[in-house]
């Protein structure tokens, strides 16, 4: 079996005593679990003079290769272009993008540097899998170095329609560089179709079969591969967590009240202010729920050096205080707002204890909190998932969740009240439908499906013929290619 080289911005090298990682780390570990390979990326450290060679280590059977960044690289590539330009635009927030030419130069410089490091460890038959928006042009720079390996790319966040992509300065050099991959994967069919329209708008020509675009004998595939979780093991983790002192103390602190839970990184894409306003509306319009419900919002801070995030932190903290000040009592705190990172085990216990989970982002690639909450539930007495229609998870979980528009505060408040009052039979039915999805599409299936499609074109053709089954969307992919790569005006 060919080696798998995984490339991502940050590499989660396991360390004793640290909170276990989730999200991308779980996905990558699933891909590397049954094949030899290397996980390459940034160490998370900033140094004045990074080494010319990646630092190699081995943990739990996985080889890690990490490099440091210089301060300028970190500020321009990561804080600058990746998080102040790509992140807002790809989340449909063009108004928040702040383009600086030097940041784009830093983004390109770091990607070229990463390509140089990856080149040192690539063997001829290696399979390369690149993750997320930090590394969009990486394949281009690897191809320029003569590498003909199979290279796949997966975007973990949304991809907006072509008109918004084109708001990105020099978009052909960044998003257009994705055509140098053999397979480009997205979370949803909507994201996939947006990219297909973007390619067509830039001159892509369909083949005779209507699903492929060819150029110089080469095909670039794009497909929808909704990322999944470790369903069975996470459910087991949640059951075990309920026996811990942490969860016993927490449940005792609720004093019999129902619990609504939100778990999000502090980010404007997560819709946290809208969510707090919806909870405030519930308390104002349904006084019978006073002293009967507690909303726990867990929000680790992130990117606090970015002004938009610092301003959001101030607003949310102030809003939480206002809600508690207006509605609280000496015996009841309506809202617990916590800026702390918890282990996956602790979160699993909190999910299982929750009566309602509010997963209401304004825009999200997938949002695994929704899936983890469902997996953690007691099937005999499950909680209710309140889910934004703009989360990628809505494509799979919409048949069991209460779907909401997070911009409609009164509608979310009404849905929250319905969730709190939902009969047991309906809760069980909704939970069972969502669990069918989670048991069908596990993280192992997700990784294998992507790698099969990358390495075996007939496997991708099989996905093309797959049809929706129950709540689970099909995982089709269409073949795309590209003409006029990197036109002069884009370079």
Image (cartoon, rainbow, N blue to C red):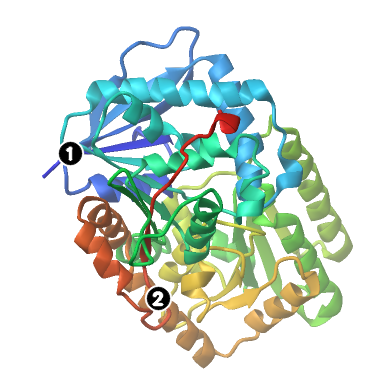
* Position in image of residue 64 (x %, y %): 28, 30
* Position in image of residue 203 (x %, y %): 51, 50
* Position in image of residue 323 (x %, y %): 83, 60
- Residue 299 visible within the image: no
Dot label at residue 361: none
Residue drawn at x 61%, y 56% is 161
Instruction: Classify residue 255 by image quadrant.
Output: bottom right
Q: Quadrant of the C terminus?
A: top right
Residue occupied by mark 1 = 3
Other residues around mark 2 within 10 Å, as few (<14) / some (14–19) / many (≥20):
many
* Position in image of residue 273 (x %, y %): 76, 56
Q: Is residue 121 above or below residue 441?
A: above
Residue occupied by mark 2 = 472
Q: Is residue 6 or residue 490 the one in the foreground?
A: 490
Other residues around mark 1 within 10 Å, as few (<14) / some (14–19) / many (≥20):
some
Instruction: Classify residue 355 by image quadrant.
Output: bottom right
Q: Is residue 370 left or right of residue 63?
A: right
Q: Earlier in the sequence, mark 1 or mark 2?
A: 1
- Residue most extreme to the right: 326
- Residue most extreme to the top: 49
Instruction: Measure how far apart labels 1 and 2 are at the Cα level.
Output: 31 Å
Q: Is residue 432 above or below residue 335?
A: below
Q: Is residue 456 left or right of residue 112?
A: left
Instruction: Classify residue 78 by image quadrant.
Output: top right
Residue drawn at x 71%, y 46% is 94
């Amino acid at each position: 079996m060919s080696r798998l080289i995984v490339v991502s911005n940050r590499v989660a090298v396991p360390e004793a005593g640290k909170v276990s990682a989730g999200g991308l780390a779980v996905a990558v570990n699933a891909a590397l679990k049954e094949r030899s390979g290397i996980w390459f990326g940034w160490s998370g450290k900033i140094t004045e003079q990074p080494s010319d060679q990646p630092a190699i280590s081995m943990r739990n059977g996985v080889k890690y290769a990490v490099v440091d960044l210089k301060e300028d690289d970190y500020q321009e590539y990561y804080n600058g272009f990746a998080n102040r330009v790509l992140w807002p635009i790809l989340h449909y927030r063009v108004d928040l993008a702040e383009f600086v030419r030097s940041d784009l130069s830093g983004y390109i410089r770091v990607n070229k540097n990463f390509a140089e490091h990856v080149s040192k460890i690539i063997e001829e038959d290696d399979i390369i899998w690149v993750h997320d928006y930090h590394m969009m042009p990486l394949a281009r720079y690897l191809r320029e170095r003569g590498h003909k390996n199979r290279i796949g790319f997966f975007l973990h966040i949304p991809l907006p329609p072509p008109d918004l992509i084109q708001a990105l300065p020099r978009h052909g050099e960044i998003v257009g560089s994705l055509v140098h991959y053999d397979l480009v994967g997205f979370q949803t069919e909507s994201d996939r179709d947006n990219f297909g329209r973007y390619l067509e708008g830039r001159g892509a020509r369909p083949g005779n079969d209507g699903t492929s675009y060819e150029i110089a004998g080469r095909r670039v595939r794009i497909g929808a591969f909704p990322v999944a979780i470790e369903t069975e093991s996470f459910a087991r983790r949640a059951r075990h967590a309920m026996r811990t002192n942490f969860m016993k103390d927490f449940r005792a602190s609720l004093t019999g009240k129902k619990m609504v839970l939100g778990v999000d990184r502090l980010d404007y894409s997560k819709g946290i202010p809208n969510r707090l306003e919806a909870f405030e509306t519930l308390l104002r319009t349904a006084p019978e729920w006073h002293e009967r419900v507690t909303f726990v919002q867990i929000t680790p801070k992130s990117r606090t050096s970015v002004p938009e995030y610092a301003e959001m932190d101030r607003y949310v903290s102030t809003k939480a205080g206002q809600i508690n000040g207006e509605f609280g009592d000496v015996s009841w705190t309506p809202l617990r707002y916590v800026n702390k990172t918890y282990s996956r085990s602790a979160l699993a216990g909190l999910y299982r204890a929750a009566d309602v989970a509010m997963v209401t982002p304004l825009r999200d690639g997938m949002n695994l909190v929704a899936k983890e909450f469902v997996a953690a539930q007691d099937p005999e007495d499950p909680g209710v998932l309140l889910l934004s229609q703009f989360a990628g998870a809505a494509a799979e979980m919409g048949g069991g969740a209460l779907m909401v528009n997070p911009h409609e505060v009164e509608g979310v408040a009404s849905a929250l009240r319905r969730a709190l009052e939902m009969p047991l039979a309906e809760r069980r039915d909704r939970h069972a439908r969502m669990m069918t999805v989670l048991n069908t599409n596990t993280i192992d299936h997700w990784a294998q499906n992507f790698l099969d499609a990358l390495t075996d074109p007939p496997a991708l053709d099989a996905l093309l013929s797959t049809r929706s089954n129950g709540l689970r969307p099909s995982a089709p992919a269409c073949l795309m290619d590209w003409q006029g790569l990197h036109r002069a005006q884009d370079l």
